[in-house]
Amino acid sequence: MTHETDICIIGAGPVGLFTVFEAGLLKMRCHLVDALPQVGGQLSEIYPHKPIYDIPGLPNILAKDLVTSLMEQIKPFNPEFTLGQRLEELKKNDDGSFTLTTSEGTTIHCKIVAIAGGLGCFEPRKPVVPKLEVFEGKGVNYIIMNPELYRDKKVVLAGGGDSALDWTIFLADVAAELTLIHRGESFRGAPDSAEKVVQLAAAGKIKLELNSQVITLDGDNWLNSLTIQDKDENLKQVETNYFIPLFGLSPKLGPIENWGLNLHRAAIEVNTVDFATNVPGIFAVGDINTYPGKLKLILCGFHEAAMMAHGAYKIINPDKKSTLKYTTVTGISGF
């Protein structure tokens, strides 16, 4: 199939979805493409039940509920979606427009390309532990899709970043027994979350093993215990039903690497005026871009999407002046 649109958004995660809203306010049509079979990106695929705390005006919202709200927000602008297909080829036409082709042969012709691919193609970083692959899906998980799976179970988490801290706080009231293992003395995640984890440990609600790492896994058809080694090489065996190492994701840009974009450490370099790349007509917003002072937060991606939409408007409508109009005055209307 062939589609015509103003902006082709690569990635249907939260920032990609919000880009539709900002573009829609400026009367630009959007078509979103994502390799995943559903919208929401990491929020839907990796942690749909994880609470998010840093969305303005929402003290606490589950990842999946944020996706639902974003979809409701962009409904007036009638975006088109191509899901379950990866973009393979990008061609810049003589008139400055673009033709993109997916893995399934779908073609999208657009005036602007907005890359909102999050971490790109990603896979979990796995610790070097003997027999780890043997227990994958049999007690070893790298992603928490449904926290109810761990209710009243013995669970061991490993990691020192935001994901490990957030899930420790959340699962403290779900698991029968919860242990967090971290190789360091201090955490890399948000200080407030780190303080809450320490408080949970002091109250006896979780077990905290610092300066430690998992060195062996044991069980028959299912994981039933693991061994922890501390910095002094002391060993401790822990009974568990699940071991969940949360060491982040290893990003891969995939075909985007071949599009002539300036890259730095698997991220796309952009300016901070409108988050344009070095290729005219191609923008990048959200976790996939990089610039001095970059913060990988959803709310920062929302800001980038707003600025990018105004930059795109100037290219699509070179003879028109873009005037910022407040939605409190104009309201929201579709096409």
Image: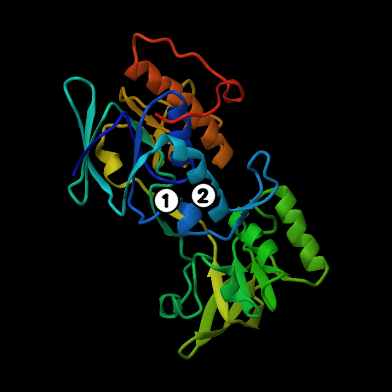
**193 left or right, relative to 226:** right
Question: Residue 159, image x and y in percent?
Answer: 59, 61
Residue toward you, 333 or 21: 333
- Residue 291 at least partly seen: no
**287 left or right, relative to 197:** left
Provide the secondary structure element on which disc 1 rests: loop
Q: Looking at the rendering, in which quadrant would you find the C terminus?
A: top left
The crowd level at tag 1 (other Cα within 10 Å; few <14, some 14-19, many 20+) is many
Residue at figure coordinates x 36%, y 34% from the top left: 30
220 vs 261: above or below:
below
Residue beneath disc 1: 39
Residue at figure coordinates x 68%, y 48% from the top left: 190
Q: Amino acid at mark 2?
A: Val
45 vs 137: above or below:
above
The crowd level at tag 2 (other Cα within 10 Å; few <14, some 14-19, many 20+) is many
Q: Are marks 1 and 2 in contact (CB under 8 Å)?
A: yes
Residue at figure coordinates x 78%, y 65% from the top left: 200
Q: Quadrant of residue 24?
A: top left
Residue beneath disc 2: 67
Residue toward you, 273 or 30: 30
